[in-house]
Amino acid sequence: MQIVLCSLIGYLFGNINPAYIISRCRGFDIRERGSGNAGASNVMMTMGKKAGAFTALFDIAKAALASIIAFHLFPHLKYAKILSGSMCILGHIFPVLMKFHGGKGLACLAGTIIAFDPKLFITLLLFELIIGLTLDYVCVVPMTGSLIFTTIYALSTGDAVGTIALAAVSVIIFIKHIENLRRIQNGTEAHISFLWHKDQEIERIKHNAN
């Protein structure tokens, strides 16, 4: 019952999607614009930096909060944080309230890592910033980040249940980003430099799409 409740807390928190809520308040569905992703990166591209930053912070906070609540409610469940955080990521990616079409889980992954170990989060953040800026693609960050965190968690805790949960999430995150890899291949994936060279990036993507 503790495992079920712990998972339910995470999943329900994951269903709260600020990208979708903000877009609906503005009269459209975020999943019908840009990349079709109900997450911070698409919000930033379609509604601006401030809305994107708010969305990212909200998604980080909901995963961290779900993990912390589960930990305090079930202190004897050693994998409470990771299980609830993992389910929050899945709830964000496959929200029942949005017919299972949500975001891709990067910000929620960040929140889960923060709840587990803030110092580790800062280290991974710096590492992923180097990778992301070097390759100039956001999509490489969740794929490599989820794999690295799962490996670190497994080696540092020896917790089989938490490791399995994170491994499952890593596989799903990778699968969700296959379309990004395809767009990289055909030149239609937005670079991180979209944030400061928006017009150039839009023109490049349109040109390659044609």
Image (spheres, rainbow, N blue to C red):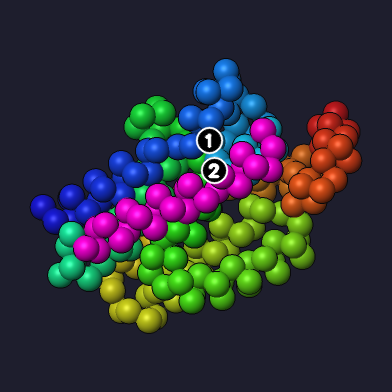
Picture coordinates of residue 114, whole percent (x, y): 44, 66
Residue at x-position 74% and y-position 62%: 133
Distance from the alpha carbon under mark 1 to that under mark 2: 6 Å
Q: Is residue 139 left or right of residue 19?
A: right
Query: 11 or 177, which lies in front?
Result: 11
Q: Is residue 45 left or right of residue 187?
A: left
Give the residues in magenta.
47-72
Label 1 environment density (alpha carbons within 10 Å; few <14, some 14–19, many ≥20): many
Residue at x-position 64% and y-position 58%: 140
Picture coordinates of residue 99, whole percent (x, y): 40, 27
* Residue designated by label 2: 55
Q: Is residue 56 magenta?
A: yes
Provide the secondary structure element on which disc 1 rests: helix
Q: Magenta part mainly helix, strand or loop?
A: helix
The reply to whether discs 1 and 2 touch (Cβ–Cβ < 8 Å) is: yes
Residue 185 seen in the figure: no
Q: Is residue 209 magenta?
A: no
- In the figure, 125 relative to 42: above or below? below
Residue 112, located in which quarter of the rendered image?
bottom left
Residue at x-position 65% and y-position 42%: 50
Considering the image in quadrants, where does the C terminus appear? top right
Tag shown at residue 19 = 1
Residue at x-position 44% and y-position 53%: 61
Q: Earlier in the sequence, mark 1 or mark 2?
A: 1
Residue 96 seen in the figure: yes
Picture coordinates of residue 54, whole percent (x, y): 56, 44
Picture coordinates of residue 34, whole percent (x, y): 67, 31
Q: Amino acid at mark 2?
A: Thr
Label 2 environment density (alpha carbons within 10 Å; few <14, some 14–19, many ≥20): many
